[in-house]
Amino acid sequence: MQWAQQLILFVGLQKNTDMALQTDPSRCALGQWLSGAERAKVESLVPALAEVLARVDGPHRRLHQSAVTIRGLAAESDWPGARRTLENETLPALEEILALLEMGTDHIGKAVADMRGRTDTECVRSVQVNQVAMGVGVFIGLLCFVALLRSILRPLNKLRNYAEACRAGRAADLDIRRKDEFGLLADALRSLMASLNRELAFSRSMLAGLPVPAALYDRDNKLTFANRHMLNLLELDGNPEDYYGRTSGDFLFREEDRETASVSCLRTGQPAERAVEVETYRGNVRFALTQAAPLYDERGNIAGVLSVWMDTTDMHTHEREMARARDSMLRVAGKAQDVAETLSSTSRELSVQIAQVNTCAAQQHQQAQDTAVAMNQINASISAVNDNARHADETGREALKHAKKGQTLVVDMLEAMHALEKQAVQVCENMDALRRHADGVGEVLDVISDIADQTNLLALNAAIEAARAGDAGRGFAVVADEVRKLAEKTMQATKSVVEVIANIQNGASLSADSVGQAVLAIQTTTGQADQSGHALEEIVELIGELASQVAAIAISAREQAVASEQVTRAVDETSAVAGEAAEAMSHAAHATENLAGQIGVLRDLVEELR
């Protein structure tokens, strides 16, 4: 029990003295009992206990082996490693031993109860009970050890959890209110953490108040602090706490294993300074000067690194603009030198050409005057053409008007001829019908003539028969004679009608022939009238085209007159401009001389600029 308590206190208090603990599992109190004769006696009385005690050997050896490991780590001042060994090896082995001992106590209790029920004699029972009692005493001592050990482990676990929470930056409460050493240790730890929190808050507020981007990394290159300026430089959203725990390469460049100034500072222990180009989280490029300085703990070991950044994007931009401006200025100077040389040679050529242009300007002035005289004569001719074109336009319009009237009369005549043709055809058809009716009347008259002949014959026969009859047929003879006379009159009238009908037929035939000839003549006249109408239409179209062309000629003549006037004015202006140009050429010659002097000055300035 004292062995376990000393080991836990040794790790919890991080003592620098040597750990005075037994590391041989066979020489501690529990090891001596497990390897002594008392174990065999207890196992003979309680056989079920043998298996439990056999299972204790493994965790018992691991318990002492963990003590050896903790001693080595403490010698190297690796207290985090010693604490991990205590948590991962010592305490699990100790818990396993305690669980097995509680199991063995249960087996002993059952064995004692069985013995009391089986033994008959008091003596035997007394001996056996005494033997078992010795084993029970040992286990009771072990249970006391367990209870005491747990009274130590619980506050130690609370202290450890509180320390872990404080180390991780989490808010935690140390629930230990005791008057013993653990209570004093808890009070001291709470006071220590309060002081550390005040100093940490002051340090963080000081870092947060820096006017430049700043960040803190621990000795594992993990981000533990960044101010708002740092997030603004990288164009990051959210709070700085959202990015804690990331490496400097991942936080700054999204590259986990990138060699940054902070990594170099942690590796060498020396301040590092670098000019970097960083792409922000929004894809923009920034230039900055970063300085990394190591931070040490109370033992002089590197505990972290402070990284301070200075945004040099604007300065870098200005430098590039100045460099571009300098390069541009040098290029311009070179071009200006070339231009000066070109201007120098050009000015000399220009002087010669100006003299030539001056001579040409005088000639042009004289030619412009001659052209003005010729243009005045052309204007007079164009005016006469314009008048003639106007008269021709008016005459053409009158001719077109009369032609259209003639076309209208021809159209009316054609319509009348077509109507006359239709009426003549109708008369011809009527004459044919009259002739056919006359022929029909002739046929009827033939029948009447035949009937009259028959009637005359019948009347003659009746007279003959009446004569034969004598007096009895005298009245009948009178009637027969009257009938004969009537038949003769009918025959005479029929002959007269036949003659009249024949005359009508002859007249109808002659009229039909005349009407047919008239129809042919009318059709011929109509065809000729149609041809005349078409010819007249073509004449009207030609006269219209002629009138349009004459109108176009008149318009062109007017336009030519206007253009001629403009040309005349332009020639006059050209003559004036030519005079002015001659005068300007004289001034240009003087200006060219001045330009040559200025080119020399420009050449000297370019040389000084270079």
Image (cartoon, rainbow, N blue to C red):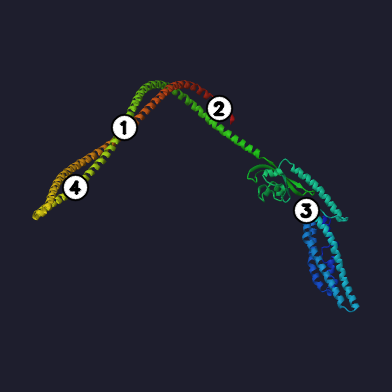
So how many labels did they put on this image?
A: 4
In the displayed orientation, state which residue is furthest to the bottom: 120
Quadrant occupied by the C terminus: top right
First in sequence: mark 1 vs mark 4: 1
Q: Residue furthest front?
A: 471
Q: Position of residue 523 (x, y in %)?
A: 24, 40
- Tell me which amino acid carries mark 1: Lys
Give the mark nearer the N terminus: 2 vs 4. 4
Q: Earlier in the sequence, mark 3 or mark 4?
A: 3
SS for callout 2: helix
The mark lying in front, picked from 2 and 4, is 4
The local secondary structure at tag 1 comes to helix
132 relative position to 565: left or right: right
Q: CA distance from mark 1 to mark 4?
A: 54 Å
- Residue position for label 2: 602
- Badge 3, how many Cα within 10 Å: few under 14, some, many 20+? some
Of the two numbered discs 2 and 3 on the same chain, state the one appearing first in sequence.
3
Between 154 and 51, the one nearer to me in the picture: 154
Query: What is the CA distance from the residue labelled 1 to the residue labelled 3?
Result: 123 Å
Amino acid identity at mark 4: Val
Which mark identifies residue 441?
4
Q: Is residue 171 above or below residue 400?
A: below
Q: Which mark is residue 405?
A: 1
